[in-house]
Every structure is written in C-alpha cells, then in structure tokens.
Image (spheres, rainbow, N blue to C red):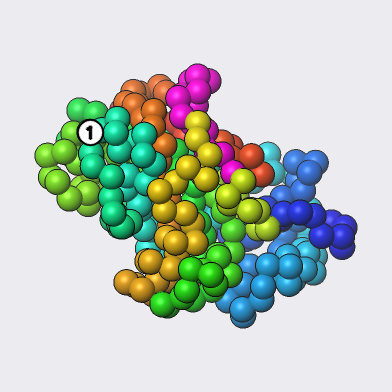
Amino acid sequence: MSDALAPSLRIARFAGSGSAFYALLEDDGRARELTGDPFALSAQGAPGTEIRKRLVEAARGASRPTGALRWLPPAAPSKIIGVGRNYRAHAEELGHALPTEPLLFLKPSSAALEPGGTVELPRASARVDYEGELGLVIGRRARRVTEERALEHVLGYTCVNDITARDLQQKDVQFTRAKGFDGFCPFGPCVAVGLDPRELRVETFVNGARRQSAAVAQMIFGPARLVSYISHIMTLHPGDLIATGTPEGVGPLRPGDEVAVSIEGIGRLVTRVAAAAD
C-alpha cells in the first residue's frame, strides 16, 4: 500500500488461518493485514488525518485476496445503539409522530451478523423488515462530548441493516424483542475512515430492486448530534456501533431474499434471508 493518504481508508476484519485480523482494503480486491488494532490506534486520541497516517503505517502485513477469506463484522461492539424515526418520511410511513429528541433503543451484540451472512426469520414473527442505515463506529471513548467535538470520537462509517420484527415491535411497544434476535444487525463490509457523513446517501436493494434511497443530510438528528446526545446518557467505547435510523421504504423479507445496503465510499453490505432452522 502506498504511503500517500487516500481520501478515505477502509478497515475490514477477516478470519483466516484460525484467527481474526484487521486489514485495509486495497483497490485491487485484496486486503493488507494491519499489524496493530485500529481501535487501539484510534483510542489514543489521534485526529482524523493522524489516524489515517497511523493506519497506513500499520498496514505492513501480508496482502491477501479477499475471496479466500471469511468476512467478519468490522468491529466487536460492546453495545449497539439504534435510533428510531430519524427520517421524517419513515416516521410518516409508519404513522408515527416526529420525535423532539433522538429516540434510542439497544440491540444486543449477539445480533451482529457478518457481511454476506444469512439471517433466519424467527418463527415468533409474521413480518420481518429490512432497514438500511448508516452506522457510526466509535473510535475513542466518548462521555459527555460536545456536538462540535463529537465526530472526533468516531473512527469511521459502515452500512447497517437494522432488521426488525415489525409485528412484535407494534405488539410489545418497546423494541427489545423486535430488534434483538440473533443476526438482526448485519453491518459492514468495512469501516470507512475519512468520509464526511453529510455527503453520504443510504440505499437498500432487495433482490436487485431499489427500495430505499435518502441522503444522510435528511436526518432529523445528524451524526454529530447523535454521538453527543448518546454520550450524555451512556459512555461510548471503541468499537461501539450507532445505527442512525432508516429512510422511508421499509418492507418485509421472505426466505430466499437477498438484501443489500449500499453507501458510496463504504461499500455494499449483502445479507441473505432464510426460514428458521428446524
């Protein structure tokens, strides 16, 4: 990998030869192994340009074709924080009032699913929906941070599918069961470092047909506001994931479907859908 800094760097996590490792994705479809933990580098408090420089310096391992590797979620969050009704049109399509402050819920870390993984539709639900979203991956500890400094605590950005059992959400009122099944939070394929989230657009495709498309700038509460707000409630640790809310156009998934969340500069998160195993 060249020492020249690209506008953004993409960190992925793989399993290979019996162990997991982080790598920087290269433009030729290969991945160069990092000799250090990117979250440890980010936790030292380096600003954006400095962390990119440190990541390039740490990319001294072997270069491998990604086709020979198993993709893993690009972070191991201690917690996954979701944001509900953060796009006006999505709140309206579900018949909900607009929130006056961020509406938060938690998904367990066991909901995480690797890129290209398969989610099983639980027998307990008659309707499970896709929800394509931008994810914020925390790079250094954030506690009671200001909105002006909030994004300094974000290592980078990823694609998220906040899979939701819609009927259970409506039945339970609170979201734990509806959002918390195993595999209900695919994210990846990487963490993109150095992007401006305000310039991004979230798109979701089901079996190749586009179902969602919205600019991050249309959010009711933007990324910096969310990080600051959440950090005044709970301490955010390196690797924690914030799913920032979904645009309008959500809909049900069925066995055999393939859903892809795509954000330019990050990549394409593909998830396959299967019936519950016997």
Asked if residue 29 lies left or right of residue 107, the reply is: right
- SS category of the residue bearing label 1: loop
Q: Which residue is mark 1?
A: 95
User: Is residue 140 within the magenta segment?
Assistant: no
Asked if residue 176 lies left or right of residue 233, the reply is: left
When asked about the image quadrant of residue 65, the answer is top right
Seen from the viewer's position, the closer of residues 38 and 204 is: 204
Q: Determine the residue positioned at 67% across, 73% down.
A: 47
Q: Quadrant of the image for the N terminus? A: bottom right
Q: Determine the residue positioned at 47% across, 42% down.
A: 218
Q: Please identify the residue farthest to the left as the structure is shown.
A: 171
Tell me: residue 150, above or below residue 19: below
Tell me: residue 95, above or below residue 33: above
Tell me: residue 8, above or below residue 140: above
Whether residue 14 is visible to the viewer of this picture, yes or no, is: no
Residue flagged by tag 1: what amino acid is it? Answer: Gly
- Pointer 1 local density, CA inside 10 Å: few below 14, some 14–19, many at least 20: few
User: Is residue 210 within the magenta segment?
Assistant: yes
Q: Determine the residue positioned at 20% across, 28% down.
A: 126
Q: Quadrant of the image for the C terminus? A: top left
Tell me: residue 63, above or below residue 122: below
Magenta stretch: helix, strand or loop mostly: strand
Asked if residue 9 lies left or right of residue 198, the reply is: right
Instruction: Report x, y in % for residue 268.
Output: 58, 37
Seen from the viewer's position, the closer of residues 92 and 175 is: 92
What's drawn in magenta, residue-wise? 200-212
Instruction: Report x, y in % for residue 118.
Output: 43, 36
Q: Determine the residue positioned at 24% across, 29% down.
A: 127
Whether residue 175 is visible to the viewer of this picture, yes or no, is: yes
Instruction: Report x, y in % for residue 264.
Output: 64, 39
